Image: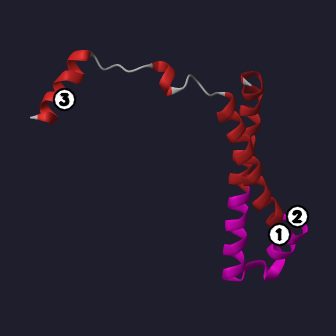
Amino acid sequence: MKKIAKPLMALAALVLFGTCLVTVFDLVEVLMTSVGLADGGPSSYYQNLNIPIISVALPIVGMILFATILLGLRGRPADAAGSSATKRDIYLSIRIIGG
């Protein structure tokens, strides 16, 4: 799974960058429409480029990519790593709690 995760990192970064660009485009379109600039021009471009669909689909694709990467880069489970507490630490905590 690690072999799959490494190449997907570049694609996930590209999707994240694309999502940011689409968000900026959405913000500019909303600001231009609310101020009344360009007399509805940005809204027609917004619809023709299918930006509403892209602004929903791109983050979904990004979340799936990042989930795949996280599953692929999973390390050792916490149980296998073991505890760093010594016997002295355990007995000391029992004495403090037990009085």
For label 2, the residue is 49
| Residue closer to the observer: 96 or 41 | 96
- How many badges with numbers are in the image? 3
Q: Secondary structure at mark 2?
A: loop
For discs 3 and 2, the disc positioned in front in the rendered view: 3
Binning the other alpha carbons within 10 Å of mark 1 as few (below 14), some (14 to 19) or many (20 upward) gives some
Q: Are marks 1 and 2 in contact (CB under 8 Å)?
A: yes
CA distance separating discs 1 and 2: 6 Å
Residue 33 percent coordinates (x, y): 72, 79
Q: Is residue 34 visible?
A: yes
Q: Which residues are magenta?
A: 22-50
Rendering quarter of residue 37: bottom right
Q: Amino acid at mark 2?
A: Leu
Q: Amino acid at mark 1?
A: Tyr
Q: Secondary structure at mark 3?
A: helix
Residue 90 percent coordinates (x, y): 24, 23
For label 1, the residue is 46
Q: Amino acid at mark 3?
A: Ile
For label 3, the residue is 94
Residue 35 percent coordinates (x, y): 66, 81
| Residue closer to the observer: 38 or 59 | 59
Of the numbered discs 3 and 2, the one sitting upstream in the chain is 2
- Residue furthest to the top in view is 87
| Residue closer to the observer: 48 or 54 | 54
